[in-house]
Amino acid sequence: MLVSEPIVHVCFLSQDIGFADPLARALGKEFTTRASSESQLDGLTDLREWCDVVLLDLRATSNQGDYQVGLHLISEICKRPTYPPIVALCDEGNGQVILNAIERGAYDTITNPPNMMELRLVLRRSHKSHLAEREVERLKAAARGNGRLHELMGTSVVMQDLFALAQKIAPCDVNVLITGETGTGKELLARAIHHMSSRSARPLVAFSCANLPETLVEDELFGHEKGAFTGALTMRRGRVESADQSTLFLDEIGDLGLGLQPKLLRILQERSFERLGSNNTVNVNIRIICATNRDLSALVQQGKFREDLFYRLNVVQMHLPPLRERRDDIPLLAQHFLDKSAEQFQKNTKRFSQQALHAIEEYAWPGNVRELQNAVQRAVVLSEGPTVEVRHLPAALRQGCDAPEFNHCYEEEVREFKRRLVVRTLRECGWRKAESARALGIARGYLHRLINQLGIHELQEEVPVAVQAQIPPSARLN
């Protein structure tokens, strides 16, 4: 039993309004068509409220047949906050117009005059895309409410547990140690904790201990007095003093030199320190959150990190899992970065193709969320239209897209759909061409060409002998 498809509401934009009635009859009962001229578009407050697909006749959008009018119309429709997908009718062989239409935001194009079976397919596919985008918007709205902690995002179980723990410890001035691989978002988690704490009125002070000489790290953290060393012309406050009444975030704490670890331990114990070149004690009221991508307990065993400092820092430990261990969050993060990059670069990019999203989901992401953000940003910059394709992704992601399922082009998909549709109709009609042509709504001669083009005559042997005897010679497949 065949399941009926939902009715697709089509807005037909053309100066040739007389073409709308025969178009509606040819599309059939599964489509409703409402015609409008280009000049009436200003009166349409929101296309998306009453139609699923816009069918734009580029050739007839002006009396002079100027394609620029129709292309401008695509741009105007796409400027609206919400708009349905656009299918553009254009003359065959005009490749530049087709590319311009896609670049300006059209979902697809079809040659004019259209093949009705192909037009139904394209309109139906556009409608499904429309429904999918609405579902994505719904999920994004839900994610904003339930899958987000400040700037961190994730709906996976491990991230939801992490968000719950952060909300519990944020009001309490306990030291926090955040562990995780590079690029997982450790600083974002620290900022989220600070944002939810009583210290949020003052900005978080961040400093990375990685790859810096010990003397420079000491000056950055504790500051110096005038004349403390050559070139110290004025007194300078360090990061610790700047974080008074706020939160100090120390990234890559595992790289902190052994000579500075006692001074940090004193701050944790007594909340006091001295600037370089000074004997005066400075008291501070700070909360310290540290992060590292190294195993501090192993560093303690190796004698590279003080054990007492480790225990002071490790009051509450929070581990950010790598992206490969929370793959359910990848589509959500990718779409978030796409929306953010599209807004930043003023691009019309709105979605990933199915192949591009599959490549993103299957990649291992050794650089974690930071690598994902950079990859999506690159793809948005390189994209020409509203959809990010596989070719826009970095080479490392494209390596896994050479499988056969990614090599099907649009024409092959249409051919396979036509073949299945024609074969099914022939079987239902007892392999009679005339009756099958009427059921498909096409001319018998066109059906005969389809049978030859699609290789359906090779299925003649499937017809039972008793059925073949009842079919007139002129109505048989070959």
Image (cartoon, helix red, strand yellow):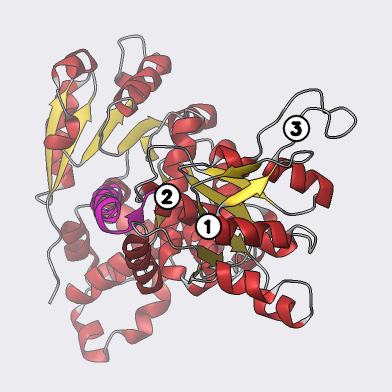
> Any magenta on residue 135?
yes
The CA span between labels 2 and 1 is 9 Å
In the image, what residue occupies the spot 66% across and 34% down?
237
The CA span between labels 2 and 3 is 30 Å
Of all residues, the one furthest to the top in this rendering is 64
In the image, what residue occupies the spot 51% across and 67% down?
320
Q: Which residue is mark 1?
A: 289
Q: Which residue is mark 3?
A: 225
- Percent from the top left, x then y, of residue 288? 53, 55
Q: Earlier in the sequence, mark 2 or mark 3?
A: 2
Q: Magenta region: which residues? A: 126-151
Q: Is residue 84 left or right of residue 341?
A: left
Toward the viewer: 149 or 256?
Answer: 256
Secondary structure beneath disc 2?
helix
Circles 2 and 1, Cβ within 8 Å, touching? The answer is yes
- Percent from the top left, x then y, of residue 307? 67, 76
